[in-house]
Amino acid sequence: MTHDTTLHLPHGALALPAFLPDATRGVVRAVDSADLEAIGVEGLVMSIFHLMQRPGATTVKALGGLHAMTGWQRPIVTDSGGFQVYSLIRQNSKFGSLTDRGLVFRPDGKDKVLLTPEKSVQLQLSFGADVVICLDDCTHPDDGEAEQRESVRRTIAWAKRCKAAFERWLAAPRRTREAEEGGAAPYAPRLRASAVRPLLFGVIQGGASKELRKACAEALLEIGFDGFGYGGWPLDSEGALLHDIVAYTRELVPRALPMHALGIGHPDSIIACAHMGYDVFDCALPTRDARRGRLMIFNEPPNRTRFDGRWWSYLYIGDDKHIKSAAPISEHCDCPVCRRYSRGYLHHLFKVKDAAYLRLATLHNLCFMMQLMARLRQIIAEG
């Protein structure tokens, strides 16, 4: 890496590269903030799209913003809602529609909710986000050229509006913010007292087209952002990373600017993207796999791995061969779960569907990710 290996944010610093677990609805399922702090998680990603619906914007603000509400005092990156455009509306029009004005969605199939670029930014800031993501029009790489061009056009137009809203919010005195948001803003004194302001990231769209990716990146660089995200579905129809276009997109952005590989979290993909120059990763994969009985293990000591060959694998805790195993999940892991519990006990908890299994498995997989990132940072620092 040729840029700063630390991202300085209002609620602390992120050592780069960093993996941020998805706390989509304000929680990493089955664990709490104290659990996450204890295993070294430095930041979380939360979804503005989901949180504005439940518990709702007024509730989040009444509870003091996301940090106070969740008891998490480290950095939070908020997703703008752009991915939900892809996952909901583009795949099923009954959930809403896209217009140049913004995103119209029907969470219950009846009532309409409008999410504009301005509202997305205002909500993220009012919730106390450390990194605000611009609202974008997300696509799948298999979408047609016309759809991709429209996505890039709309993403650029929305990015301009997001940037303007972000600058207006930062420039406004506290009383103006409170009036716009309908009440006191408990986070405002912290932001004013901090020498570090929230960051605004643009999102580069363009599908699998290098021409469109280049056009989108150049337009967003001209607008000016603190960092960027890789936009759009990053996998092909076989589930493999779109290596060429992901790498090309990173090349379009100066290395001095951080890039978030949005939604990328498979261990092999993280290693590949880190070597391309990506800095921040998030994904629900490790925690979802944990709940389903797929536990991640190092096949060699994590502090010595070079991430080549078969350096990691899955352990399926529901397999009968683990019934009487007194071994830890992984002999190379020093996480709290591996230090205390056996495969046999975790197998038992999994089979009886006890909630304790969900917590312990989630903690183990997240510890795996934290050890992966620590070793990756070490290798990058060594050159």
Image: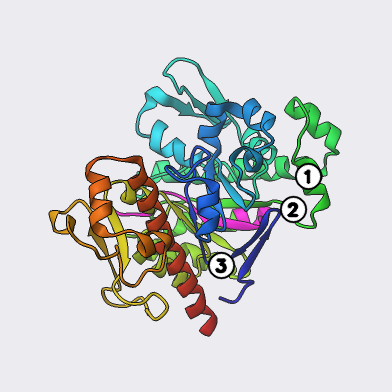
CA separation in Å, label 2 and label 1: 9 Å
Give me the residue at 41% from left, 41% from top. Answer: 147
The number of callouts visible is 3
Compared across the picture, whether 373 is left or right of 119 comes to left
Q: Please state which of residues 377 and 242 is positioned toward the viewer in this rendering.
A: 377
- Write down the residue under mark 3: 16
Q: Nearer the viewer, mark 2 or mark 1?
A: 2
The answer to whether 174 appears left or right of 20 in the picture is right
Using the rendered image of the protein, determine whether residue 383 is visible from the camera's viewpoint: no
Q: Is residue 325 above or below residue 289?
A: below
Residue type, mark 2 in image: Arg
Q: Amino acid at mark 3?
A: Leu
Inspect this view and state whether residue 152 appears: yes
| Residue identified by numbered label 2 | 197
Q: Does the magenta-highlighted stretch encompass residue 254?
A: no
Q: Are marks 2 and 1 in contact (CB under 8 Å)?
A: yes
In x, y percent, where is residue 110? Answer: 45, 15
Q: Secondary structure at mark 3?
A: loop
Q: Amino acid at mark 1?
A: Leu
* Residue interval drawn in magenta: 220-239
- As for residue 229 lying within the magenta part, the answer is yes
In this rendering, the answer to whether 316 lies above or below 135 is below
Rendering coords of residue 70 (x, y %):
59, 40
Residue sitting at x 51%, y 19%: 112
Q: Name the residue rendered at 35%, 52% in the picture.
A: 361
Say which of 15 and 340 sits in front.
340
The residue singled out by tag 1 in the image is: 170
Quarter location, residue 228: bottom right
Where residue 128 appears, as percent x and y from the top left, is: 68, 42
User: What is the x, y in percent for residue 251?
Assistant: 51, 68
Alpha carbons under labels 3 and 1: distance apart: 26 Å
